[in-house]
Image: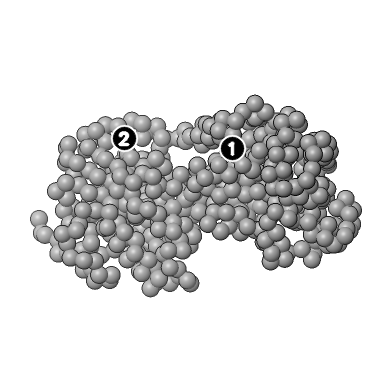
Amino acid sequence: MVRIAIDGPGGAGKSSLAKRVASELGIIYVDTGALYRNIGLFVLRRGVDPKDREGVCALLPEITLELKFENGRQVILLSGVDEGDNIRTPECSMAASAVSAIPEVRAFLLEMQRETARKKSVIMDGRDIGTVILPDAEVKIFLTASPEARAERRFKELSAKGVETTYEKVYSEMVERDKNDSTRDIAPCVPADDAVLLDNSKLTEEGSLKKVLKIVKKKTKPHNFYSRAKIIVAPPFRFFMRVKAYGLENVPKYDGFVICANHIAAVDVISIGAVCPRQLTCVAKKELFSVPVIGWLCRKLGAVRIDRGGADVGAIKASIKAAEDGKVLTIFPQGHRYPGVNPITTPVHSGAALIAYHAKCDVVPVCINVKGGKYGFLKKVEVHFGKPISYSELGFVNGGRQEYQDATDKIFHAVCALGDYESLPKYIPGSRKAPKRKKK
Ligand code: DC
């Protein structure tokens, strides 16, 4: 999970930059200025002076604001209506700036902004994101430019929208707004101590985007035991087992999700980990934690300990929390290893679906194909990553055993569809039976 805060004065280009960063990283963009603008609009329509603290506070109980995301796009409903460009007029900008200096208005909007960033990776722009709203954000950028450059951009933006104004008017309003926003007592527009300052007066949009992506990459690079172990283990493993990855573009870059894969051998997890760009969190049976070296490794790698004897509520809760915290939980729903057996013919457990339901996260199907069905030196191992199955596609309504089983069928069907199993009978949900295991 990543939270990126972009603060800075008006006209610095925060919103267009943040939108592009969001689409590059596959995360959502939250424009917090639009919240203040909606309040400014409401206050103006009611004929109240936006600087009149008492008058504005008296209106707050009447304001209903809803912040939601439709196909990744932010939508704000003011009394149930999306006001669109009505909040972008110069009058509304000044009103937003005035109401944003009122502590009660800021308190009114605080939780709504924090809640948005609690479960999803976001890039949020505003004035106080790095200092007040998300003080723990992994990346903080303070974007600025000279007042002249900002006024020029804003003037062009307004003219393109058909708003009649002049450069001089835009410039003087911008300077006034800068003063209001940066000198107010509460949450002034100032860089957080740990923010990276970026002046884009002379940069193109492309140049700013490149810089921000570089900052994000640097700040979010893991420096932990997993990444160090991966550097040592992954290259020789990939080489000697001839591991090849397919569909890596399907791996979400930041949010938590569940990987569901077929299970051939204990090294499956290394096959996935050696090619997956994200750090994996595994679920390991509790007995493994007491095996020398392996137990130490499980602990160092943050594996979730599970008691396979029965319903292990603690392990389920820990798994849900891991997915909620933005981790990549790797689960083998077959529960057992089935070397040389087509996964479609094996029984599967529905724990992964239960976790996805509670963590409200997506599931990425992964199919491991080993030539001949068994791992071996220089044999080819293919790791196929399928398209994420979104939470809504999993068809949950109220949860429950039947829903988890149906979702599991859907997930495992997707796992098998990624493999090379065309020669086998068509998949019929719920018809799978455990294959008889040969006695050694
Ligand atoms: O980013 P913008 O121009 O749409 O913001 C409108 C006003 O809202 C701006 O003048 C200051 C205020 N604002 C704020 O105080 N804190 C934020 N996080 C975002 C905007």
**Residue at horizontal 17 percent and vertical 36 percent from the top:** 378
Q: Earlier in the sequence, mark 2 or mark 1?
A: 1
- Of helix, strand and loop, which one carries label 2? helix
Instruction: Please state which of the two labelled residues, at mark 2 or mark 1, is closer to the viewer.
Output: 1
The image quadrant of residue 350 is bottom left
The image quadrant of residue 136 is top right
- Given residues 208 and 374, the one toward you in this image is 208
Label 1: few (<14), some or many (≥20) within 10 Å? many
> Which mark, residue 131?
none
Label 2: few (<14), some or many (≥20) within 10 Å? some
Disc 2 and disc 1 in contact, CB within 8 angstroms: no
The image quadrant of residue 424 is bottom left
- Given residues 102 and 376, the one toward you in this image is 102
Mark 2 lies on residue: 234
| Residue 276 appears anywhere in the view | yes
Total of numbered circles in the picture? 2
For the C terminus, give its image quadrant: bottom left
- Of helix, strand and loop, which one carries label 1? strand
> Where does residue 168 sit, x and y in percent of width and height?
82, 35
Q: Going by the image, does 356 lie left or right of 29?
A: left
Amino acid on which the number 2 mark rests in the picture: Ala
**Residue at horizontal 45 percent and vertical 68 percent from the top:** 396
**Residue at horizontal 31 percent and vertical 35 percent from the top:** 234
Q: Going by the image, does 226 lie left or right of 49?
A: left
> Where does residue 423 sit, x and y in percent of width and height?
15, 59
| Residue 132 appears anywhere in the view | no
> Where does residue 118 sit, x and y in percent of width and height?
59, 52
> Where does residue 194 sit, x and y in percent of width and height?
65, 32
Mark 1 lies on residue: 139
Amino acid on which the number 1 mark rests in the picture: Val
- Given residues 177 and 282, the one toward you in this image is 177
